[in-house]
Amino acid sequence: MKRNIVIATIAAAALVGGGTATALAVTDDDGAPTPRSGERAASEVRDDDVLDDEDGQDDDVTEVKSPKTTAADALTAALRHTPGTAVSAELDDEDDADDDTGADVVTWDIGILDSAGSWHSVHVDPGTGKVLSSRTEREDADDTARVRAALEGSSTSAAEAAEAAAAQGTVTSIELDEDAGSPAWEAETRARNGTGHDWLVGLRTAQVTPDRSSDDD
């Protein structure tokens, strides 16, 4: 009974005003709202039905853009600037990225160990591939010794490991894991939908395998 009264009231108002009712909020006899035929309740709307106003992309999906300068290219550029052995590369993509200029920018942070045993942090622009800054860092002598021991006899450089891991996605970091029972390069990759994966790259074979230890983190 209540439903008929509501429908009649809205229809009458539309006819008097010469307009058209564009939406009907119909209630049943218990007073609860009932979706119009062909519509879904808000609880039934899936996440992928919600679109951005401008580009039509899903609001809950963030498209990951690959840097123009890959990890391998950034490592090569850093080594041209600061000769030595590259042992890590990380794409610092946080909004509050800390760099030598004090600006909040995205950079590749390359770790290099030179022949004299000094450590260097070299920042490379991921857009242009140019070296932005470089600074010397202090590391414990024992850590340096472990790195040198792990790399002894290695035939796969950090850049080569990054190239191998790039077949799995965009490489966002690579570093030497010298503490493992079998030292290897650890690589992180990211798919276009933001999904991240961890990999191990052999120091001598450059073979890429899933990093199962990361499943325990």
Image: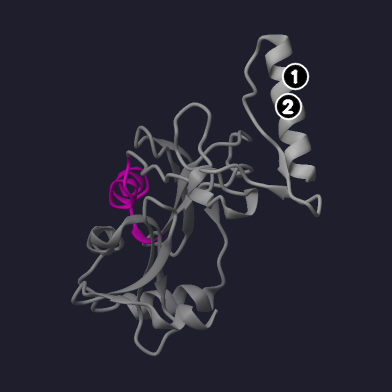
Viewer-side residue, 121 vs 216: 216
Q: Tell me if mark 1 has few (under 14), some (14-19) or many (20+) residues whose alpha carbon lies within 10 angstroms of its own.
A: few
Separation of disc 1 and disc 2 at Cα?
Answer: 5 Å
Whether residues under marks 1 and 2 lie with C-beta atoms below 8 angstroms apart, the answer is yes
Does 16 sit left or right of 155 as displayed?
right
The residue located at (29%, 52%) in the rendering is: 72
Which portion, as a residue range, is magenta?
69-88
Q: Is residue 83 magenta?
A: yes
Residue placed farthest to the bottom in the image?
Answer: 181
State the SS at label 1: helix
* Above or below: residue 144 compared with residue 25: below
Residue 126 image offset from top left, x and y in percent = 39, 39
Residue 66 image offset from top left, x and y in percent = 36, 44
Does 59 sit left or right of 150 as displayed?
right
* Above or below: residue 11 compared with residue 173: above
Where is mark 2, residue-wise?
10
State the SS at label 2: helix
Q: Quadrant of the C terminus?
A: bottom right
Where is mark 1, residue-wise?
13
The residue located at (36%, 59%) in the rendering is: 86
Does 60 sit left or right of 108 as displayed?
right
* Circle number at residue 163: none
Viewer-side residue, 111 vs 113: 111
